[in-house]
Image: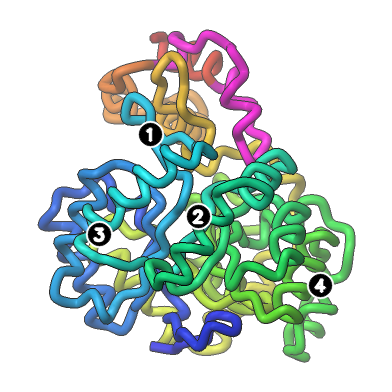
Amino acid sequence: MEYRTVGKTGINASVIGLGGESLVEPPAKEVEDIIAAALDRGVNIIDVFMPGREVRGKIGRAVKGRRDKVLIQGHIGSTDIHEQNDVSRDLATCKKYFESLLTDLGTDYIDFGLFFFVDTPDDFSKVFEGGLLDYALTLKRKGVIRALGASCHNSETARRIVETGLVDLIMFSINPAFDMTPAESDIYELLDDAKLKQNFDFHIERSRASLYRLCAEREVGITVMKTLCAGKLLSADLTPFSGPMTVGQCIHYALTRPAVVSALIGCKTREEVLEALRYLDMSDEERDYSSVIEHYQGDFRGNCMYCNHCLPCPARIDVAAVSKYLDIASVTQGRVASSVVQHYKALDKHGSDCIACGSCEKRCPFSVPVISNMRRANAVFGL
């Protein structure tokens, strides 16, 4: 395993980590196998943003006896309503869920305490100009959290967070599709590898390039979410590039951005953990992503990342699940497999239950036309 230091903290994190959201569905025994496979091979960082007590309990039991070997990213402000993810800026609510996180994980400290989902100016104001900041700084002084950060999808807001001088790290969504939407400034500024400079010519969105440089200058580490773009970069049908990337190429892209410490990969099986860790043994040629992404095929905004940041839904629709089955149906060009239809029908709520309130689209960090997608799902699946 390779390790990098998280900003100025002196804490070393593995370059490949685990995204905890993928551990929601597998049973406890499988979660233990997944985490053991990672820890046994040197992975030492796990993100746990999910508010559900069941999944946090599974993770807590899986790391029991090995807590000192694991760096946990825990979030302040991640809550749930009717078992759906939500975000809160209410101090009492945030305290309740954070204290519950400690209990569920069976620990008395969190290594990286992150303000959850700080994307808009309003989010920034409520977090950094209110009682939440004081609460987090108190936790840090007491050693309940070792380092302070925030999760964010918006580069301009992330810049404001870094410029406060109060955070040690940012959890940010990074992959080549996001970085090239839209293309404005030359990525040569960010890469020192002469081979890459010779082999391709593509562009990175200016504010994202500026954010990565700022983090490097201020010694603020970046942990990466959406490394695989919800698996879409691995699909020949869904990628915006000339062909599918490998898991290793996606990881390498993230790790070659300035200030990036760790690429967090969602793994639902032990085999997926091993596939991600194969990156460490890959040759330079296997890691090289240039030939794939040099031909960018367009804007990637509007693509669902299945993150469910759009929740809670008043109609209690699992938007990510509906979107995922809709994407699968789109790839099959109308010849929808019976298994996909069955999975869709098994959902508690469907696209037809959408009331078009628009709250999802306001929350979505990736500009997904959720209401339109729900209508399409209803037309495709007939429910």
Q: Which residues are magenta?
A: 350-373
- Amino acid type, callout 2: Tyr
For the residue labelled by badge 3, is the local secondary structure a helix, a strand or a loop?
loop
**Cα distance, mark 2 to mark 1?**
20 Å
Q: Which mark is residue 135?
A: 2
- Amino acid type, callout 1: Asp
Q: Which residue is mark 4?
A: 187
Q: Residues within 10 Å of mark 1 (few under 14, many from 20)?
A: some
Q: In the displayed structure, would residue 271 be above or below residue 335?
A: below
**Cα distance, mark 4 to mark 3?**
35 Å
Q: In the displayed structure, would residue 62 be above or below residue 192?
A: above
- Amino acid type, callout 4: Ile
Q: Position of residue 15 (x, y in %)?
A: 47, 79
Horizontal side, residue 113 vs residue 100: left or right: right
Q: Which residue is mark 1?
A: 80
Q: Which residue is mark 3?
A: 269
**Cα distance, mark 2 to mark 4?**
39 Å
Q: Quadrant of the N terminus?
A: bottom left
Q: Position of residue 153 (x, y in %)?
A: 64, 51
Q: Quadrant of the C terminus?
A: top left
Q: Closer to the camera, 244 or 168?
A: 168
- Magenta span contains residue 295: no
Q: Which mark is residue 246?
A: none
Q: Residues within 10 Å of mark 3 (few under 14, many from 20)?
A: some
2 or 4: mark nearer the eye: 2
**Cα distance, mark 2 to mark 3?**
36 Å
* Comes first in the chain, label 2 or label 1: 1
For the residue labelled by badge 2, is the local secondary structure a helix, a strand or a loop?
helix
